[in-house]
Amino acid sequence: MAVTEVERRRGKLAALSIAAMVILVGVPLWWKTTQTYRAWLPVAQINELAKLQLQLSADVEVVFARGTATPEQQKKVPVTQTQDEDHAVDEDTTLRYRHETRYRTATVMEEDALKQPTAAEADLSLHRLSESPCGSLVIYVIPESSSLLPENVNVYIGQRRTALLRIGAQMKVGKTLKQLLAHLEPRVKQILQVMSFSHNDITAALSDRVRFSPDNKESIADSMRAFKSSPGYEITFSLLNPDPKSHRLHWDIEGAVQTYIQPLLTKLSPVANFSLDSQILYYAMLGVNPRYDSSRSAYILNADSLAHVINPVEARLGSNAASSNPVLNFLLYVPDAHHSPLYIHDHKKREVQTNAFHSPRWGGIMVYNVNGFYQTGTNFPVDVNINMAKVMGVFLAQLRLLLGVQSTAPPSSFQVAPCGSSGLADWELDRLMWSRSVENVATATTTITSLAQLLDQIGNIVINDNIAQQVSSAVTSLQLAVAELEVGNLGFALQYSKEAILASEKAFFDPSLLHLLYFPDDQKFAIYIPLFLPMCVPILLSLLKIVSEVRQRRREKQAKKD
């Protein structure tokens, strides 16, 4: 009996020790070695960014030329005024526009510059004196007697960040400075609507985050036409020759790009990187049959048929698999001799002057007729030298639209200077940078917020250190971009917003996030039960037996006491 009691006690101790080892050592070790690694994320800062509160600040300088302010008024300048305009786009997005306007009198050199014979020369002279920072504007108030502007023009907007404003004769004498500034304020607002950011432009940039109101149809059209913001774009120029037997086409695409396109892309370098290539496609047809108009002895391509042109042609263009950047396609189509001349008509059955059309977020196509080269007795194929100035003028206008360079229609009393050889005015670049900065911030916040919600809802997803680093980098860049927009540093704001969107998308699309995403609980049980059940059953039975014996002893002791 003594031996049996010793063995039973030894069995109990062995069972208890094994159970203790499993509970105290085995279970924590298993839990630690099988848990999903999740690095720390700045969730609190991400939640703060989810409620987007943007403030856009622009510095405006109003300079009074000689003869626009009385001596009494000049004594009270310089003076600075700040105007705030708040907009609640939705419950999670609020916008504030701040314009800090500083009024001062013109310097001697500025007065000399304003004595130039034309407004364009005055604009160039003022630019040479001092270059305005990115995102700022300078408005020169000139007297009514100035010969810089025609009689029916009150405002001249130059190629840089400068505007000329003619003051009314009624404001020259007998008015206080406060009345003078109140008279100028609505005119200055009109200039800002043209040269700086507008609420419609900024709302359009938030299209991925907020819903449009029905009264923003123009902004909706502009945002749907232009490509979304991207770190880079691929631009492809293609010459389509459907019948090489009819004509041999010669185009100096390299020289044309350097002359007409490259200046614009150089100026747009702060916004994105661009790469260009060209190709010639033979026997490439439009894919639709144009209608013959006997009254004009020409073929007509109706507006309803234009939608069916893209797909057949796009199949021949090829794709750049080495790059994930959006591709802008510009196609020059030269009809064959049997379908020439070919003209494009709009929805009102009128001939399109440029004989070209563009497809939103895709590119543009221009039809180039060479029927003038076909004469009686002409030997085929005909050598045709394409007028690249005519072609690039059309493609340049389409490129501006597709990249989001929005041209607001100015009031009738405004005169806007041509954009020059670069194809883009400085203030147009600023408008685009404002929109791109806001769009990048909105897109990055949406991406990083969606990622944080996804990781919070699905606990199986591994969060590696590199993902946490990308998320933290995106949050930091977003905070810096918002801060730079608030103080009006447009160049830095755009740069930080580009870094934010790159880091957020890199973290969101990291392939390591998918490793354990499709590893449900039933698979876990299928793996763990064959391993742990054979070991746990004897231990549990031993523990139950021990508990049962302890209870039995307690009952026996209680019975003896009774």
Image (spheres, rainbow, N blue to C red):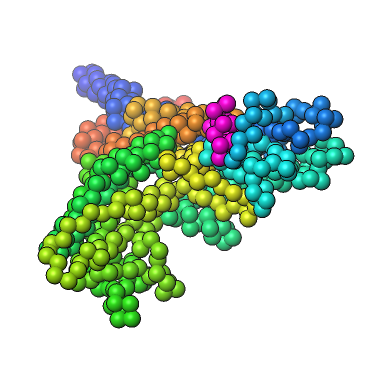
Name of the residue lying farthest toward the bottom = 294
Total labels drawn: 0
In the rendered image, which quarter is residue 512 located in? top left
Magenta stretch contains residue 510: no
**Nearest the eye: 338 or 60:** 338
Magenta stretch contains residue 133: yes
Relative to 54, say whether 18 is above or below.
Answer: above
Q: Which residues are magenta?
A: 120-137
In the rendered image, which quarter is residue 118 located in? top right
**Nearest the eye: 332 or 113:** 113
Relative to 22, say whether 375 is above or below.
Answer: below
From where the camera sits, is residue 185 visible? Answer: no
From where the camera sits, is residue 36 visible? Answer: yes
Q: Position of residue 361 (x, y in %)?
A: 37, 53
In the rendered image, which quarter is residue 310 located in? bottom left
**Nearest the eye: 328 or 150:** 150
**224 displayed left or right of 123:** left
Name of the residue lying farthest toward the right = 174
For the point 67% across and 48% down, the residue is: 154
Q: Position of residue 243 (x, y in %)?
A: 15, 63
